[in-house]
């Protein structure tokens, strides 16, 4: 398999005139062998690059971000072909990004020096950049006075925790926990338990926020709860007697909590096995309060991630376990209505898994060798490796078949993304229609840097 990366090389004059606009560069690339997959790569470039595959913005919007002088293409086929290529951002090449959180129209990047960067569109102040800024076409620093250790994004609101345990929220005020006004357009501290508690973890979906307080003993929530109750200021939801919660994550209608001992707790809807079912048809499909999920596979869990109706978990030896809806293969096993904690087999890897991410209907992971895998629902080329299949389907435009459907081409097992093997993948984030992969360590090589504004795969 051959991966490509543009570098400076002798130009080819295609017109016979000395015209820089007609110069192209060509470079021979090394071949990736099976042996290369079993060892950590040697990376030529460790500057930070942000790739976005899929439909975060319209084709024309992405085109304008990469090339402000570009005009909308005249023919539809030209616009369609843009779908196969990622948007590429090199604006913060000297900043090391450690995590990314994605919502439908915007995303947040967290750097190693605890700074936040926003990208995309937020009509309710989700970008955290003030009342006048609803769209930014490049990663832009969010003004927060304290160092941030984690951030989560939902459709209309956002939350972040600083290193001292203070919680900041912004966006639509009723969802952000602020009683005054319609929108909170800048990160604003949310006092929890009258300011006497610190926040350990936070989870969000489009209408609800849950945070972990009091050293992991208490869960507080606000928004529209899973039972339909409207609670727009933080209040105590549940207290644990013998466990301390280290991480919480929310799906569409369910919640998952992970304790310091590696135990997993779930509450809310379990129609698709999101919080595990026993198979008893008399069992209620809903649990209002957290309960421990007892299963032989759910031991020594160290990290969790949730999609709309599915869950991924990593154990202490780097294996992935999944449960929940699996109609699109997002659980990493052959498609079915739902699955129940199952091991996700990651082929072509000699490294343990260190990083997991869930979109509503697709999934991704990164191993200790900084290799990226994706699987699940495939529409919009958000799985990255589905280019050729998507092109055939869209070009043929078969009657009665949706050109946006990701069902027929869904992938039910992790697929290695070969075109990122020459880059050190740092983190990945998923949303309904797009995938974000961040590569590099923020180390810019000395000397002249090639500026590549092209959107390349």
Image: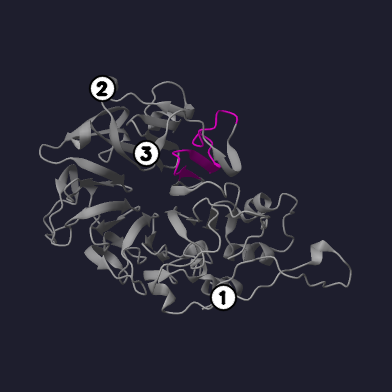
Between circles 3 and 2, the one closer to the viewer is: 2
> Which of pointers 1 and 3 lies earlier in the amino acid sequence?
3
Q: Where residue 5 appears, x then y in whole percent?
A: 60, 67
Where disc 1 sits, the SS reads helix
Regarding residue 54, the answer to whether it shows in the image is no
Residue 196, which numbered label? 2
Residue occupying the point 23% across, 58% down? 316
Look at the numbered discs 1 and 2 and tell me whether their residues touch, using CB distance below 8 Å: no
Dot 3, how many residues are within 10 Å of its Cα: few (below 14), some (14-19), or many (20+)?
many
Depicted 103 relative to depicted 209: above or below: below
- Magenta-tinted stretch: 107-132
Position of 286 compared to 400: left or right? left
Q: Where residue 125 appears, x then y in whole percent?
A: 51, 33
Position of 390 compared to 413: left or right? right
Between the residue at mark 1 and the residue at mark 2, the CA separation in whole angstroms equals: 59 Å
Look at the numbered discs 1 and 3 and tell me whether their residues touch, using CB distance below 8 Å: no
Position of 261 compared to 363: left or right? left
Where disc 3 sits, the SS reads loop
The residue where tag 1 is placed is 392
The residue where tag 3 is placed is 207
| Quadrant the C terminus occupies | bottom right
Dot 1, how many residues are within 10 Å of its Cα: few (below 14), some (14-19), or many (20+)?
few
Quarter holding residue 27: bottom right
Between circles 1 and 2, the one closer to the viewer is: 2
């Amino acid at each position: 398999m051959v991966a490509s990366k543009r570098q400076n090389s002798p130009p080819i004059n295609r017109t016979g005139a000395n015209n820089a606009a007609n110069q192209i560069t060509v470079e021979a690339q090394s071949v990736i062998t099976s042996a290369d997959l079993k060892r950590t790569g040697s990376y030529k470039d460790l500057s930070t690059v942000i790739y976005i595959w899929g439909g975060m913005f319209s084709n024309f919007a992405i085109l304008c971000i990469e090339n402000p002088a570009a005009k909308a293409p005249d023919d539809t086929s030209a616009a369609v072909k843009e779908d196969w290529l990622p948007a590429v951002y090199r604006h913060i090449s000297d900043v090391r990004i450690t995590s990314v959180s994605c919502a439908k129209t915007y995303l947040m990047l967290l750097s190693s020096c605890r700074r936040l960067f926003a990208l995309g569109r937020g009509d309710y102040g989700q970008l955290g950049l003030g009342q006048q800024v609803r769209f930014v076409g490049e990663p832009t620093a969010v003004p927060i006075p304290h160092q941030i250790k984690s951030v989560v994004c939902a459709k209309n609101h956002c939350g972040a925790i600083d290193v001292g345990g203070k919680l900041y929220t912004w966006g639509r005020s009723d969802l952000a926990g602020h009683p005054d006004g319609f929108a909170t357009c800048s990160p604003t501290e949310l006092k929890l338990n009258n300011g006497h508690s610190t926040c350990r973890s936070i989870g969000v979906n489009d209408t609800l926020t849950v945070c972990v307080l009091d050293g992991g003993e208490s869960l507080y929530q606000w928004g529209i709860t899973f039972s339909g109750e409207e609670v727009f200021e933080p209040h105590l939801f549940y207290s644990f007697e013998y466990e301390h919660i280290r991480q919480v994550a929310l799906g569409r209608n369910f919640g998952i909590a992970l304790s310091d001992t590696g135990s997993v707790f779930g509450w809310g809807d379990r129609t698709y096995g999101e919080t595990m079912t026993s198979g008893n048809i008399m069992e209620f499909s809903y649990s209002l309060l957290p309960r421990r999920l007892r299963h032989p596979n759910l031991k020594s869990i160290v990290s969790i991630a949730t999609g709309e109706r599915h869950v991924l978990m990593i154990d202490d030896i780097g294996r992935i376990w999944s449960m929940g809806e699996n109609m699109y293969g997002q659980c990493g096993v052959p498609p079915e209505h739902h699955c129940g904690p199952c091991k996700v087999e990651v082929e072509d890897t000699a490294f343990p898994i260190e990083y997991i991410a869930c979109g509503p209907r697709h999934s991704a992971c990164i191993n200790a060798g900084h290799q990226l895998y994706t699987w699940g629902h495939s529409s919009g080329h958000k799985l990255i490796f589905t280019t050729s299949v998507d092109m055939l389907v869209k070009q043929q435009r078969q009657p009665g078949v949706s050109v946006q459907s990701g069902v027929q081409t869904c992938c039910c097992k992790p697929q290695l993304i070969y075109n990122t093997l020459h880059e050190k993948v740092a983190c990945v984030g998923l949303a309904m229609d797009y995938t974000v992969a961040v590569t590099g360590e923020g180390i810019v090589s000395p000397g002249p840097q090639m500026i590549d504004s092209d959107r390349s795969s």
